[in-house]
Amino acid sequence: MRLGGPEPAIKAATRAGDDAFFLQARLACISVATVCFAAAAGLEGQKLGSPLVAALPGVAAAGALAYRARPALALTPPLGLDGDVEIREAPGKGEGLFASRRIKEGKFIMDYLGEEMSAEELDERYENLLEARYALELTGPLGLNPSYIDAVNPERSNLGRYINHCSRPTCRKVRQRFPDRRLRFFAARDIDPGEELTFDYGESYWIGRENELVE
Ligand SMILES: C[S@@+](CC[C@H](N)C(=O)[O-])C[C@H]1O[C@@H](n2cnc3c(N)ncnc32)[C@H](O)[C@@H]1O
């Protein structure tokens, strides 16, 4: 199973991930540019004696600290089995993950965690890739050097492995490429208690599995 191909829904999620990536890159550039400007202006500042120029190193340091703190600011803790979500049977799909309480649009749900492996390692593990039901693709910068997260082993993964497919999903998948590669789920809309958490696996996932699909 290799998700994250050229499907529109995955592209939309990827775009959101790219937006996050470019925001992060912009923050990094602003910090670096401010440091450079402060260094250059600092020399001049000795002549000019400007308080603004004198404050620039502080601004740069604050920018760098804000950049470092960004993941903690952006994300709330992942949802858990203690009142947020529950695992139960999803007819025709095996088990699934369901909301136990109301989840607001945009809320961070959780990352997709599992064993990270290369394409070669995935091929070694699965003779037939249709068996790789829990493997999601992690794309590198500029789409290069992809790797995979395989959540087949419940002891080496998290609740993300129970999120089933829907073409009108309640969650969107966001690819984070920087500072580390992650697949993150966010609520695509307000989710009511009892509703299933789903994301769009993309059309390519269902090639060879068409007969299983429940919408
Ligand atoms: C990542 S697992 C999801 C959790 C899985 N339902 C379980 O019980 O562990 C992906 C597998 O769940 C099933 N599945 C997910 N969404 C489905 C859907 N909409 N229709 C049918 N089966 C689905 C398929 O067997 C698929 O290969």
Image (spheres, rainbow, N blue to C red):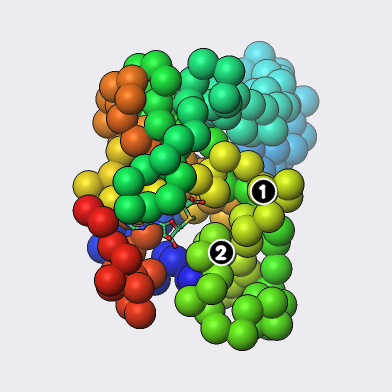
Is residue 42 shown to the viewer in this render?
Answer: yes
- Residue 177 falls in which quadrant of the image? bottom right
Q: Is residue 75 left or right of residue 179?
A: left
- The local crowd at label 1, few if under 14, some if 14 to 19, many if 20 or more residues have their Cα within 10 Å, is few
Point out residue 166 in the picture as x, y percentages from the top left corner.
Answer: 29, 51
Q: Nearer the viewer, residue 48 or 69?
A: 69
Q: Residue at x 70, y 68 (%)?
A: 117
- In the figure, 125 relative to 188: above or below? below
* First in residue order: circle 2 vs circle 1: 2
Question: Which amino acid, by three-letter code, is at mark 1?
Answer: Pro
Q: Is residue 143 left or right of residue 186?
A: right
- Report how far apart the C-alphas of labels 2 and 1 lie in the structure: 13 Å
Q: Which residue is mark 2?
A: 135
Q: Residue at x 31, y 30 (%)?
A: 195
Question: Which amino acid, by three-letter code, is at mark 2?
Answer: Ala
Q: Which residue is mark 1?
A: 154
Q: Residue at x 63, y 79 (%)?
A: 126
Helix or strand or loop: what does disc 2 sit on?
Answer: strand
Q: Quadrant of ligand 1?
A: bottom left
Point out residue 78 in the picture as x, y percentages from the top left corner.
Answer: 57, 29
Is residue 50 shown to the viewer in this render?
Answer: no
Helix or strand or loop: what does disc 1 sit on?
Answer: helix
Q: Residue at x 67, y 48 (%)?
A: 154
- Residue 30 falls in which quadrant of the image? top right
Point out residue 62 in the picture as x, y percentages from the top left corner.
Answer: 67, 23
